[in-house]
Image (spheres, rainbow, N blue to C red):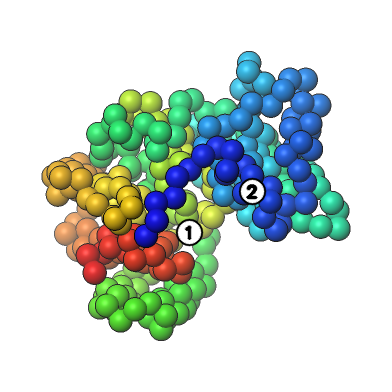
Amino acid sequence: MPLITYTLDSAIESFFSEEGTSASRAECDAFARRRYGAAALLVAVQGSSSYTVIAGSESDKIIQFRKSGSPLTESMLKLAKAVHGDLVPSCLHLGWIGDPNGSRLYIYEMNRLPRGNYITARSRLSLFAEPWQWFTTGGHEASDISTIKSDCEARFKHLAATLPDRFLPVITEVQQAIPSLFIGSYAMVLFHGDLNETNILVDTHTITGIIDWAEASMQPFGFALYALENCLGSMGPDGWKWFDDVDDLRNAFWKRFIELTGLSETQRQLAELAGKAGIILRYGIAYNAGFLGMLGV
């Protein structure tokens, strides 16, 4: 599998050249300049569905232009803010930019969270287990659990029919666990949906922010644990490679997590199955053999 090298220029060029973007980079930068009276400064790591700038060197505001197919949902942002407080940026929808008859971009104003993306700092950081509880806990009783369960079952039915046969034992294991994951005694929590190294902001061993909540939803606890696995290895030109001390790191996470939450052994087993479900759902739809190697198959 070829190694894809990220560059800021190529990420921005790709965003504005793809279908679904009727506004230009110059138009977006001009909007920020008019609103704040200063030239827009680029954020070092850009998302695939958004273009993000800082509103001037002295500003505490971020301006983000998002594709119409990837809006931020107000209700989910409010829930994320209620659960995680200052780790989630405040957000104000400012309207749209681009051709009214084409694919306009949503415009959002957010407060600027401190420090940088985990992906730019991971080489000098070690995994610290305790902060993971901040974004894997929370819940919302008003969620329609039966609808979420049906959607989950449909996704795994699709994956069972489309992924190579060697993945079927893992998919079957998760399918058998789905009823237990959606019973009232197992926690339904706020699920980020795209919890990766570019959306986690860190300072030394401290998480300072979680950004890009466009794919947030309610799911059984543990679906976000693919993010833990992301921190225990890295993807290179030869595929996925675990760190040498991966077992010690994973055990340290679970030891500390159980100390903090009082999780029973049964709940832990379900959480680990939910973690497998999260990996399959995240990487299985757009099949990638390297990442699904996390499952050991």
Residue at 34%, 66% (x, y): give it. 289
Q: Please, which residue is most extreme toward the bottom here? A: 161
Q: Which type of secondary structure does the marked residue at label 1 adopt? A: strand
Amino acid at dot 2: Phe
Q: Is 180 in front, or is 141?
A: 180
Q: Residues within 10 Å of mark 2 (few under 14, many from 20)?
A: many
- Horizontal placement of 266 versus 93: left or right? left
Residue at 84%, 51% (x, y): give it. 99
Q: Which type of secondary structure does the marked residue at label 2 adopt? A: helix
Mark number, residue 95: none
The percent coordinates of residue 280 (x first, y second) are 37, 66
Amino acid at dot 1: Met
Quick check: 152 above or below 79? below
The percent coordinates of residue 68 (x first, y second) are 70, 55
Mark number, residue 218: 1
Q: Earlier in the sequence, mark 1 or mark 2?
A: 2
Q: Quadrant of the N terminus?
A: bottom left
Residue for badge 2: 15
Q: Is 283 in front, or is 81?
A: 283
* The quarter of the displayed image where residue 131 is located: top left
Q: Residues within 10 Å of mark 1 (few under 14, many from 20)?
A: many
Residue at 73%, 20% (x, y): give it. 38
Is any atom of residue 271 visible in this view? no
Q: Please, which residue is most extreme toward the top here? A: 58
Residue at 41%, 42% (x, y): give it. 197
Quick check: 294 above or below 284? above
- Mark 1 vs mark 2, CA separation in Å: 28 Å
The percent coordinates of residue 272 (x first, y second) are 25, 60
- Horizontal placement of 142 versus 40: left or right? left
